[in-house]
Image (tube, rainbow, N blue to C red):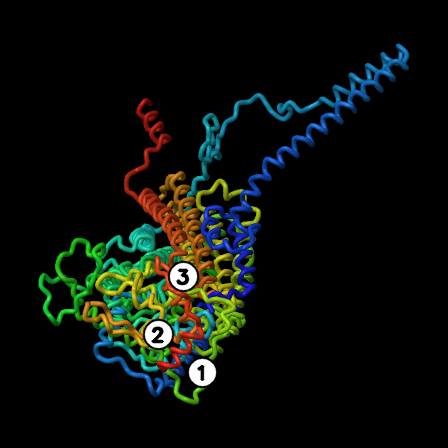
Amino acid sequence: MEIYNHHKRLFTIALVFFLALTFFAAIIPAYQAQENNAPLPNSKPLTEQETLGKAIFVKEGCIACHTQQVRNVDMDKVWGDRPSIAADYAGNTRTDIWRNTANLLGSERTGPDLTNIGIRQPGKDWHLLHLYNPRSVSTGSIMPAYPWLFEVKENSNKNDIKVMVPNEFRQGIVGDIVATPEAMQLVAYLQSLKQTKLPDGKPVPIFLYPKPESKALAGSNNGSVELDGKSLYAVNCQSCHQENGEGLKGAFPSLKGSQIVLNDDPKTLTTIIMKGYNGRVSEGYGLMPAVGSNNNLKPDEVAAIMNHERNSWGNKARKVDPAEIKKIIDLIGK
Amino acid sequence: MIISQNPQKIKMKRYFTCFMMLLPAFSVQAASEQNSQSVLTNPGVLITIALILIPLLIVVYLAVVKVRNLVKKVRLREAIEQGNEILNALKDDDLNTLEQELIKRKAAVDYSLNDHELGGDLKAEDKKGLIHQVNEINTARFIPSKKRSTIRPKVDPALSRLVIWYLMSATFWLVLGTSIGEYLGIKFVSPDVDHISWLSFGRLRPVHTNMVFWGWCSLAMIGLGYYVVYTVSNTVVKSLKSAWYALWLINASVLIGSISLMAGINNAGGEYREYIWPIMLLFAIGLVITLFNYIQIIAKRTTKEIYISNWYIVSAAIFTVVITLVAYLPFWQNGLGETIAQGYYMHQGVGMWFMLFSLGLIYYFLPQQLNTPIYSYSLGILAFWTQILFYTVIGTHHFIFSAIPWWLQTTAIIGSMGMLIPVAAGTTNFLMTMKGNFHKIGSSYTLPFYLVGIVFYFSGSFQGTAEAFRSANLYWHFTDFTVAHSHLTMYGIIAFMLWAFIYTLVPRLTGKEPKHVLVGAHFWMAFIGLLFYTIPLMIGSTLRGIAWQEGQPFIDTVVTMAPYWLWRAIGGSLMWASHLIFAYNLYFMIRQTDDIDTQTAVFDQLKKIN
């Protein structure tokens, strides 16, 4: 054929063909996504501190293992209340003259998704310990440690933020381990990662491929099928209180033998799970976030967690009933 | 929510477990997950049953043999009795003729050729020097000997030097880049191996990917491209000065890029475009120079038609300029635009640069090495245009179920299915070219690399299509399955093809061959290493995907992956070691010293005596 003997014609045709498809599949959709989009009305732009933190997130290449997108499939429900939509990323613009926009959707989930980490894990103390060495709070973790975000001081002063690193992770460091401003910026960014509520009236996108409703959920109040308290504990509580329930000395209190956990009246424990707790901050322990409310735990789920806590690690207390917990939750108000 | 288990899932899991049975090394893992299942599907129980069945089967076999022997004995006795009866009935005369007949018949039945019917008494002599490879069989042949590469017309020394420098640079980046990859693999098993910011996982991962992309594959391809574009244009080399500039620009880009990534300076996250634009600009200039040179050579061709290799190679360079511009120009990169551009870029990068260019190279090298024309030009044309049509639209299949417009995701999935056409056309073309030549594979040290490249071209690309389906994506997206896939393709296809081409070309340029044993070692270590790397990762990540769907706590799914990550590190070590051998082989082919050649030495001695 003729065109295969003329290099100018052949390569021009190939280029035009490729360019046309590129416009169709990349440039036009990208331009439209950029132009016809606006951030949600109640979304908050990042503060200066949080922006600096995002820069550290980018610098350390966290995107290699952490996504920031909740897909519209059922299995992603654990990462957010609703699927991510284009408007969630609309506020992102070019970082600076050297660097591109940082949407940070990611393509690998070696570690958990971070879209909603600010709700799931709001505690500053936990984040700092976790950044200093992830294995100090989560034994199975393979996340890198970031000790260069911390410094060692012989005598830390009042304004320094000390990190209560357990002995086996101090690697012989004697002085106080203190968070640098960079560490605080990164934590501020992580705390800022929260899904914005859709404005009233806007249709909420659904999660696809739903699991068939199981009997356990339908008739939960009858207690016919008991929820797996151990798994729920692992998802919601374990990162601080640890699998063995002993917490971490000086950071997160132990649940083993705890009077609050073992109390015959589950009211205080329910309140702490739903509302958070600051009663032991003066002892050096971290502030407990309102895990139950943040993670939308239902009464039967709270009951399952409490029964796991009350009957593990040598703890022995009577089993609580979901109906009983529901009453308490209704009473204290969500 | 957490305890609910879809019955279908359980079924799937059961099938999967049966599959795992075939791989006893991994079955322990599955066994621990299966305790709630029926005993009969427990792999441990199944293995035990199989083990018990083996001796039972042997007993049954032996019994059958015994019975058969007994029957035979009985029949033999009957036959003897019958023979005696016949003999008794015959007369003496009859007996004599019968004996004669029997002796004749016996001689006829026993006749066989004595192997000397067609031979002569003369001594064998090779007067015209036709025998090249004398294969002595007086020793045990632990390693079969391979054919030597055929001597080809001399290549212009200037061109030869240029190609070798491109290949040496490429090999340097291969060894360094995969050393980093190997180290990253170790970090999955031992995350506290170091606490140095420049070596932390997040910073080092893009160093590895970019180094093997832009350093190893790209430089090797461009270097080999110079030889192919010249040769098939049948023209002479004028000046290659700018090609040297391109070489240094690309090397500089990879070097500065790697250092900047380790220092924490990156382009904000998009895979393979982590280099910031001033650094990528160096690469882009090198690319434009290369493109310009190629087109100039083709413009001066002395053949009428443009050989198919050159369409692929030049188009790859043209498209990659476009792709880089789409990725780095800032006019459509705000909001979700960045992600759409990213999807387009990361997939066009692999498909339109590495794949298209390598296909161009194989259209030259494969027929050359087999000494046969390409099977079908029309299939090549079909593959070329359909590759452009389908490949260009599939980028967003990396963001299925994300906030990217649904129609664009669907387009990408359809495009991924369409890719079966060029892949099938290409594979058919290559395999049909090999048809009738498969016997050459065993006696060649380069053809195995071609074969592996072609096989992975089919299976790796097909796997990419399967991964794009929404239902399959549910299991595999975000897991290490993607990592396994990218190694099956970038390593199984591209790297294996590049090695095939290098082992074919360099002996032609320098006249020196690598040690065949070491080429074999390179081949087997890379190949087995790749299988150890990818198969466990695919199994582990499927289990992880299932666990995610069941809603298991996330940290449990990290722990699940541990043995598979260990296997990955083991496979990776084999691959890495094979690259060291490859580097030595390349050095062996291009080193300056002369080979100690017995033949020449003997002739030299003879001359002295005379």
Q: Tell me the quarter of the picture where residue A253 sits.
A: bottom left
Mark 1, secondary structure of its residue: loop
Which one is nearer the viewer's eye here, B370 or A116?
A: A116
Residue B90: x and y in percent read 89, 14
Instruction: Kindly tell me whether residue A33 is visible in this rendering.
Output: yes
**Number of callouts in the render?**
3
Q: Residue furthest front?
A: A264
Q: Amino acid at mark 2?
A: Lys
Residue B537: x and y in percent read 43, 55
Q: CA distance from mark 2 to mark 3?
A: 64 Å
Quadrant placement of the C terminus of chain B: top left
> Mark 2 or mark 3, which is nearer to you?
2
Q: CA distance from mark 1 to mark 2?
A: 35 Å
Instruction: Kindly tell me whether residue B254 is visible in this rendering.
Output: no
Relative placement, left or right, of B377 versus B226 is right
> Mark 1 or mark 3, which is nearer to you?
1
Q: Which mark is residue A267?
A: 2
* Same chain check for tags 2 and 3: no
- Nearer the N terminus, badge 1 or badge 2? 1
Q: CA distance from mark 1 to mark 3?
A: 42 Å
Residue A32: x and y in percent read 40, 83
